[in-house]
Image: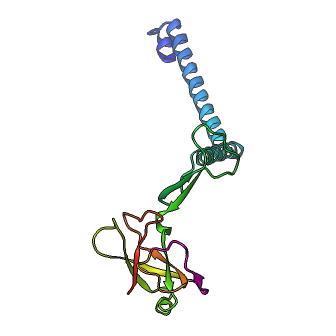
């Protein structure tokens, strides 16, 4: 533009405007380069990275705290089962660390029956027994003996057997198979060794 102004093809005002535009563009370029350099310096600062990591760790700790609080406010039974007893009703005050309900897990139900002393030699832990009961459906179901008492007991006053064979009996427990329809507690059964 200076050459055009020297020959008279451009006015002095046009030359000054062109120089001002050039200087403004150079200043804008320098400012942009400075911002880029400043951004590169601040993005790589170890202190800022450490602070951001600390904020993330704090947020995660807060989340864990809220999840624990939710578990404490609305606990879930560790196993599927049936509520056997309710100790407190809604609206009642519950002391700290007190149970609210008693749950009988489906997988831990067992048969308890008494065997006369003449038949106890046939039963050992791990042996299979079959049983039937009223309302259990057609056919027999199976259970596995898990415990045989080492000591004899007297016949309980109420025993569910066809006939009392002896005054001395042995307590036997058998694990039930996990099924879709567990037996209700206290249901009388007829047991036969296999």
The residue located at (50%, 93%) in the rendering is 121
User: Which is more toward the observer, 151 or 69?
Assistant: 151
The residue located at (56%, 28%) in the rendering is 29
Query: Main SS type for the magenta part?
Result: loop
**Taking 18 as reference, is 32 above or below it?**
below
> Is 101 left or right of 111, judged from the image as shown?
right
Colour mode? Answer: rainbow
- Image coordinates of residue 124 in percent, x first then y, are 50, 88
Quadrant the C terminus occupies: bottom left
- Image coordinates of residue 27 in percent, x first then y, are 60, 23
Q: Is residue 78 visible?
A: no
Over which residues does the magenta segment extend? 149-160
> Is 102 left or right of 50, judged from the image as shown?
left
Looking at the image, the residue that sits furthest to the left is: 138
Q: Is residue 129 magenta?
A: no
User: Which is more toward the observer, 151 or 82?
Assistant: 151
**Taking 154 as reference, is 11 above or below it?**
above
The residue located at (54%, 55%) in the rendering is 77
Q: Is residue 153 magenta?
A: yes
**Taking 93 as reference, is 142 above or below it?**
below
- Image coordinates of residue 177 in percent, x first then y, are 41, 73
**Taking 194 as reference, is 51 above or below it?**
above
Q: Quadrant of residue 129?
A: bottom left
- Image coordinates of residue 127 in percent, x first then y, are 45, 86
């Amino acid at each position: 533009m200076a050459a055009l102004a020297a020959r008279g093809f451009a006015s002095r005002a046009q030359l000054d405007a062109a120089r001002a535009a050039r200087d403004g563009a150079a200043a804008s370029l320098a400012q942009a380069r400075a911002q880029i350099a400043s951004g590169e310096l601040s993005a790589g600062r170890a202190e800022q990275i450490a602070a951001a990591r600390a904020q993330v760790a704090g947020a995660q700790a807060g989340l864990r705290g809220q999840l624990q609080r939710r578990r404490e406010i609305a606990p879930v039974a560790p196993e599927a089962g049936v509520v056997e007893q309710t100790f407190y009703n809604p609206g009642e005050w519950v002391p700290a660390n007190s149970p609210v309900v008693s749950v009988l897990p489906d997988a831990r139900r067992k048969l308890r029956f008494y065997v006369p002393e003449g038949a106890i030699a046939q039963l050992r832990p791990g042996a299979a027994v079959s049983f039937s009961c009223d309302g259990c459906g057609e056919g027999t179901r199976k259970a596995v003996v898990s415990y045989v008492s080492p000591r004899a007991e007297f016949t309980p006053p109420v025993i569910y057997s066809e006939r009392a064979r002896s005054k001395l009996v042995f307590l036997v427990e058998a694990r039930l198979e996990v099924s879709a329809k567990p037996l209700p507690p206290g249901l009388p059964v007829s047991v036969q060794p296999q």
